[in-house]
Amino acid sequence: MSVPDEPSVRPASGSGTAPLWVRNPALVSGLAVGVLLAGLALLTGRPELALVALPALVTAAFGVRPRLDTTLVRTTTTLAPSDSGEGVAFRTEVALPSAAEAVAVEFRVAGDRRHVVVVDPRRARRLTGTVPVTHSGPQEILRTHLSLLGRGGTAVSVPAAGPVRSAVVPPPHLRVQHLPMPSRVTGITGPHDSARPGDGGEFRDVALFAPGDRLRRIDWRRTARRAERPGELYVRRTFATADALVVLVLDSRDDLGADVTEWSGARHGRQQATSLDLAREAAVSLATAYISAGDRVGFRDLAGTARSVEPGSGTRHLERLRTTIAAATPHHDATATARMPLVPAASLVVVLSTFLDDQASTMAVTWAATGHRVVAVDVLPSPDVRRATRHERAASRLIALERSDRLTEMTATGVELIHWRTGDEDAPAVQLRLLSRARRTG
Amino acid sequence: MTAGSRAERSGAPSIGPAVPAWTIGALGLVAGVVGSVVVIGASGWLVVAVVLAVAAAVLPRGPFAALLVGQLALAGIGGTDLPVLLLTTHLVLATSLLWAWTPRTARVQLRALLPSALRFVAVQVGSQAVAFVVVALLGGSGPVGGVWLAMAGTAALLALAIGLFVPTLLRAGDDAER
């Protein structure tokens, strides 16, 4: 019951389509044999033949209508993406005309899976299910085709296209506890110790009371020991606190799966998480962890499909970041030159990329050279060459070697590298924990 | 783990108790084969009937179900298995009507089959009652009475077919063209 999928002719959700009724193909031959048997019974005088013809003719009589009902068939589909990664719940409502006895509904769900159900009009008014999704981001979730069976079963409707529904699937996020910090923190207040004197931080030193010092900072014990003249007071001074500034730079110019034979774009069928799925997951995980820790997080997209988000903190800002990261999609031309985004001073720059070309790595090296702490997150899935031909294997090996050299050069210039892979959920957290430890210099 | 729950995990809607669509074709196939064995018996025509039954199951939109009904009706002339003949031919036609529309890979909600099942039972009960009256009660009144009854009944059926269905079919064809 498939029909060509032409988006331009598809009705919008909730709009109606008039059913195009045709006679059931099996009815014509059944009716013909009924008439033939009745004629033979008339000619030969055998009542058995007429009796056999009787059910066929009476069954056909059930479907006789003066005029077929052409009331519009209304199909409405509503989606509810789940934040927990359980898939996208859908509810399809098909309002059928009174002339329909049953309806066959074909569902094309994400990943090109096809499900066909035949239901009665009552059930058709409430068809619910959950589409499991492998990928995050904007994608088509559900499209429907309908065919009706008329009362009596003698008429059927030509399969018609129903509405198509798409949704932005939020990426899952990994719980991360230990996070790398920028080389220095610059905010006025926050959860981290700053190098400048102020309130809220660790003990710094003891000094003579000066105008502006708060009275509650006077250290009476130290004053009793060290005061040489009457009226001389000593106060305890502390460091100020500050928040970290983190900028997530997402390289969404390409979206590659594990199967190297699909990297050319000529073959499709990715059923596993792609590089952009991993990048979205990593970006959302890091944004959630940093904002939960009270830091400020900004976002930049190299492909330019998602808007930039200036650094901020708080729950609403996290929601804004999640929405923006989920909406990042590949650019139509992955080889086009990407503009190097501006990042605030003294920020930690996290570059999420496949590093299959020089652009993201060059930017990372540049930021590291200008004093930023840069963490490169490699989101390329482990290449799978099982389906590759000999030539494809050779090509993928060359690309892997170039990429390996690029990563080595990048780490040699001070960029720290971690790998974000699926199936090994602890690995990114462990690598981040290692990066969170204080760095030794010299 | 049922096929329905497996399908629902991969994104299909839940529709309650359901059967795979191929069971409709299989029911027609079984009815055709059983009817052929009972009505025709062991002969070369049985092979033809079985082939037609298989073809009707595989290509439900073709004329094979109707051809099988015609063959069984002609083979059953003068036989003693008229109730079985009526039941199997009607079942073959009814399932072919449904199977010709149902998508092959569909899951069919049992409730959606209820109108077809009720229609089948109603027509079958009526046909068997008419057959009982014709064969059991009037069969003994002599060949003339039987022949006249057959002719009168058949003429009524033909009038019904020509007067009612032909205009309906023509109208359905016009609707499709429009």
Image: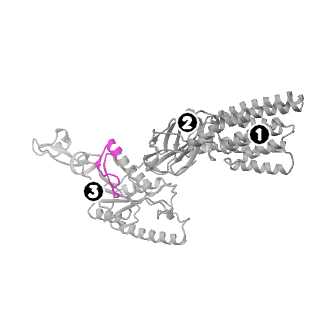
Chain-order first, disc 3 or disc 2: 2
Cα distance in 3D space between marks 3 and 2: 53 Å
Which residue is disc 1 drawn over?
Answer: A39
Element under disc 2: helix
Examine the image and state in which quarter residue B112 appears. Answer: top right
- Mark 3 vs mark 2: give the one in front: 2
> Compared to A429, does B9 lie above or below?
above
> Compared to A186, does A231 lie above or below?
above
Q: Residues within 10 Å of mark 1 (few under 14, many from 20)?
A: many
Q: Nearer the viewer, residue B30 or B159?
A: B159
Q: Where residue A28 sits: x, y (%)?
A: 67, 43
Cα distance in 3D space between marks 1 and 3: 90 Å
- Mark 1 vs mark 3: give the one in front: 1
The kind of residue on which mark 1 rests is Gly
Cα distance in 3D space between marks 1 and 2: 42 Å
The kind of residue on which mark 2 rests is Ala
Q: Which disc, if any, is residue A124?
A: 2
Query: Does the magenta-highlighted stretch encompass residue A317?
Result: yes
Q: Which disc, if any, is residue A343?
A: 3
Examine the image and state in which quarter residue A437 appears. Answer: bottom left
* Residues rendered magenta in the picture: A292-320
